[in-house]
Amino acid sequence: MKFRIVVEYDPVTKSYGAYCPELPGCCSAGDTEEEALENAKEAIALYLEPSGKENNKKGKVFEVEVSV
């Protein structure tokens, strides 16, 4: 699965911020553009990781795979 990652340089902190527009709240940063990209990949993987949270007794849990 592919995601877009937007990387922006912040002159105040002299570092790079990265976020994934398709995943609200999924963002990361790094000292270099490359580091920000690698950290963003890790953030996406963690964002998409199942939570393990128990559902209520009436609900059913399904796992689906999406390919575009």
Image (cartoon, grey):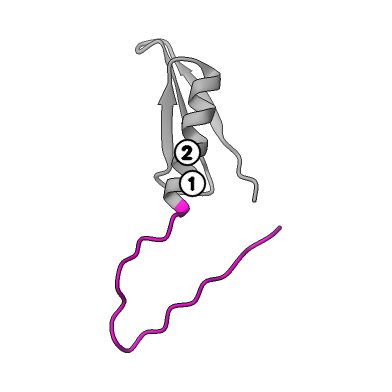
Asked if the residue at tag 1 contacts the one at tag 2, i.e. Cβ–Cβ closer than 8 Å, the answer is yes
Amino acid carrying label 2: it is: Glu
At 54% from the left and 28% from the top, the residue drawn is 37
At 43% from the left and 15% from the top, the residue drawn is 31
At 39% from the left and 45% from the top, the residue drawn is 25
Q: Which residue is mark 2?
A: 42
Frontmost residue, 12 versus 67: 67
Q: Is residue 19 visible?
A: no
Left or right: where does residue 50 sit relative to residue 57? right
Which residue is the extreme one toward the bottom? 58
Q: Is residue 64 visible?
A: yes
Q: Which residue is mark 1?
A: 45
Amino acid carrying label 1: it is: Ala
The C terminus is located in which quarter?
bottom right
> How many other residues sit within 10 Å of disc 1, few (<14), some (14-19) or many (≥20)?
few
* For residue 63, above or below residue 33: below
The region drawn magenta spans: 48-68
At 29% from the left and 87% from the top, the residue drawn is 57
